[in-house]
Image (cartoon, grey):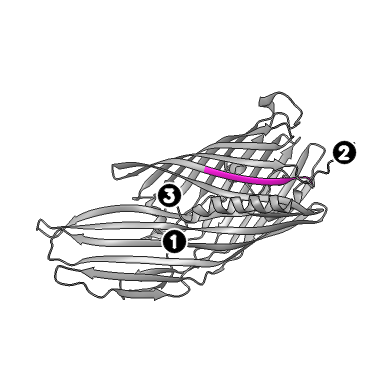
Amino acid sequence: MKKRILGCLLTAVVATSSMAQVSSTVSPYSQYGLGVLAEQSQGFNRAMGGLSMGLRDGKLVNFQNPASYSAVDSLTMLFDMGLSGQITHYEEKGKKLNANTGNFDYGVGLFRLFPKIGVSFGIVPYSNIGYEYSSQQSVGNSADVVTETHQGSGGFSQAFVGIGWEFLKGFSVGANVSYFWGRYDKSVSLVSSDAYVNTQTKTYSSSVSSYKIDLGLQWQQALNKDNMLTVGAAVGIGHDLGAEATLVTATTSTDATLTPDTMRVDKAFSLPFTFGVGATLVHKQRLTVGLDYQLQKWGSLKYPMLNEATNRYENMSGLMNDRHKFVAGLDWIPDPNPMNRKFFRRIHYRLGASYATPYYNIQGTDGPKEFSLSAGFGIPLVNSWGNRTVLNISAQWVHASASSLVTENSFRINIGLTFNERWFAKWKVD
């Protein structure tokens, strides 16, 4: 049994380690802050807008609130893996562009360690960086043209181990401890069509290796025989990541290549304090509806930036905003009885919506606000051994826009598999 658990864990680690190496975005907005924040949701709740704080189900791995782990069944070993693909339409001042991206998103697992104590593990993305664009500008009245090119790649991920404990009937607490890592490489180059004019390239880079801690709480109460209320909250501990950011400026011309100028910033990045709260109501084990709110305190954090006034690369304030996110979602299953032979009555039908404010500024202007709508299905797959795997499929539309900036419209397909294995059942032989 230990070998099976370890083998599945290693498979998840190898498969999802690519998230830190391959970006799943080509958005120009990913050059700001720590990049485009990844959705901290999975196949089952991505169709519900990312609803998570009050979700409590022993057949799901809800890593956004570790208090939920204590609901896992004693005979269950859960694995959840997912991937996504999207088509994004970019538009700015009449110019349009389409781009396709995709990636393996996450891999998580959950099992019961002791009565009322569940343990989870996995790898999930935190943010993605990937962009390339250029612009041209004439020099005075001459025929010379200067081309400015921006490029960037990278991202950040977290590998976690979590525990949830129902310490009192209806009350559960939990914690995730993560290894947080990643890197980025960004560059801005100025190239003139005049061969006798200097060209310049600024290269920004950083590598992060730190930790991340998230705490969770859930309270569950039966309102009557048909309705169950769950209220949940989660807190992310903000702290300095202890990373160093580097800026290298290289200047060349036809006459000579100047020695690159290197500037460094210590303690360049921090994780924000995060707080989330929400509630779900389950009616007759068929209908689940819920609301979430999350706050990320980015506004008080500093970020490394080249100060144009002093020509120094330094930590600067006023570049970020507190981020607010609101989520609403529902899940409906016509008949929760697994013995029902009518296939379509055992499918989960899901809807969700979310709205989020930007966490960064762009030259003194707020970044794009984000609105999304999603819908999907949870399709049970039961084999002859009685395993209860669920195929989660959802479609998502995400709209990001800001005044006088690029507008993004993304259509995303998410696919997840939740493997529900009865590993811990005792076999009887007559």
Q: Position of residue 15 (x, y in %)?
A: 55, 50
User: Residue lying furthest right in this view?
Assistant: 430
Q: Is residue 19 visible?
A: yes
| Residue found at x 51% / y 52% | 38
Give residue 33's mark. Answer: 1
Q: Main secondary structure of the magenta part?
A: strand
Q: Position of residue 94 (x, y in %)?
A: 28, 42
- Judging depth in this view, the residue of 214 and 290 nearest the camera is 214
Viewer-nearest of labels 1 and 2?
2
Kindly identify the amino acid type of the residue bearing the numbered disc 2.
Answer: Val
- Considering the numbered disc 2 on the image, is that residue within a helix, a strand or a loop? loop
Kindly identify the amino acid type of the residue bearing the numbered disc 3.
Answer: Thr
In the image: residue 61, left or right of residue 125: right
Magenta extent: 75-83
- Reading the chain from its start, which is encountered first: label 3 or label 2? 3
Q: Quadrant of residue 410?
A: top left
User: Alpha-carbon distance for marks 1 and 3?
Assistant: 15 Å
Kindly identify the amino acid type of the residue bearing the numbered disc 1.
Answer: Gly
Q: Position of residue 316 (x, y in %)?
A: 41, 71
User: Answer yes or no: do the residues labelled 1 and 3 have beta carbons within 8 Å?
Assistant: no
User: Alpha-carbon distance for marks 3 and 2?
Assistant: 54 Å
- Judging depth in this view, the residue of 219 and 26 nearest the camera is 26
Q: Mark 2 — residue? A: 429
| Residue found at x 21% / y 60% | 191
| Residue found at x 54% / y 64% | 272
Viewer-nearest of labels 1 and 3?
3
Q: Residues within 10 Å of mark 2 (few under 14, many from 20)?
A: few
In the image: residue 361, left or right of residue 297: left
Q: Quadrant of residue 145?
A: bottom left
